Image (cartoon, helix red, strand yellow):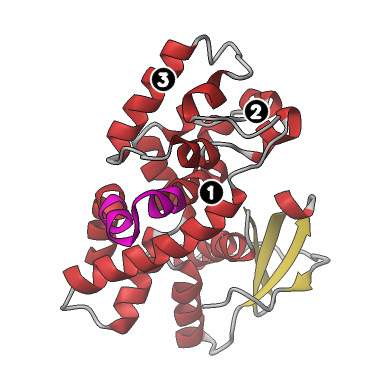
Amino acid sequence: MSSPASAENLVTDHPTSEQPGEGLAAAALDAFEVALGHRFADPELLASALTHRSWCAEYGGGSNERLEFLGDAVLGLAVTETVFRSRPDHDEGDLAKIRSAVVSEDALAGAARSIGLGGVLLLGRGEVASGGRDKSSILCDAMEAVVGAVFLDAGHARSIEVVHGLLAEPIRVASLHPGDNDYKTRLQEMVAQGSGEVPRYLLTSEGPEHDTRFRAVVKVGDLTFGPGHGTSKKRAEQAAAEMAYGSLADGHIPPNESTESTESTGDRP
């Protein structure tokens, strides 16, 4: 399928039961732009941002992955600038913890849900059937793509405004207790105060290169916690660290288990 001329005809090129007509599609996209706080001068950018790879596998065309790559960097800079200017009382370490919490999968997926992003995504039929419109990983990636599209459509200053509007509440919450969501750091500090050991993360992955899923366990001494799952090494390790931190804080000691994994060397705090 060739690239569509606009977001509206992209949504209706291959109608499904969830996409019954052009008028409804246009209305849904209009409501989404209102919720996002940005009207696209170039509708093709919005169309690209909303196109998941599962749609492309069925109908052809390009996915939102390039915009996701750009949006990840734009989000990081936008959140960094916002917290730097709005939190003059926080030091570098706290600012880094706030940023980490705000650009996490949970925070971005929450922002995506708040503006109805899942309802306007173009997904393949299988992904729709499996609940893809509410999957945190898909929503997080699409949120990054939309921010990347805003950056290309209107520039840096406008993307800062949009990101601040989307993430003002997560920034406020993260600023109250910086680092609460960074379980790798919290686990490392807890273990260091106790045994002085360093948690070791063991990682495996599965799936094709464009859709890799990671599984991580964390070893603290002779104890193994997990597994945690995620669409990146960092997210999987954070999930495993959260399990370990919660178990150790509650005094719960899991049974030992053997895990055939390779140790992750990247994405460490």
Q: Which residue is mark 2?
A: 130
- Percent across and percent down for residue 90 are 22, 78
Q: Amino acid at mark 2?
A: Ser
- Give the residue displayed 76% in from the left and 62% down from the top: 204
* Cβ atoms at labels 2 and 1 below 8 Å apart: no
**Mark number displayed over residue 204:** none
Q: Amino acid at mark 3?
A: Ala
User: Which quarter of the figure is the N terminus placed in?
Assistant: top right
| Residue 253 placement: quadrant | bottom right
| Residue 37 placement: quadrant | top left
- Give the residue displayed 67% in from the left and 28% down from the top: 124
- Percent across and percent down for residue 188 are 50, 79
Q: Secondary structure at mark 2?
A: loop
* Cβ atoms at labels 3 and 1 below 8 Å apart: no
Magenta stretch contains residue 151: yes
Q: Nearer the viewer, mark 3 or mark 2?
A: 3
Separation of disc 2 and disc 1 at Cα? 17 Å
Give the mark nearer the N terminus: 3 vs 1: 3
- Percent across and percent down for residue 227 are 66, 57
Of 134 and 83, which appears nearest the observer? 83
- Magenta segment: 148-162
Q: Which residue is mark 3?
A: 26
Q: Which residue is mark 1?
A: 141
Give the left or right position of residue 75, taking residue 129 as reference: left
Q: Amino acid at mark 1?
A: Asp
Q: Secondary structure at mark 3?
A: helix
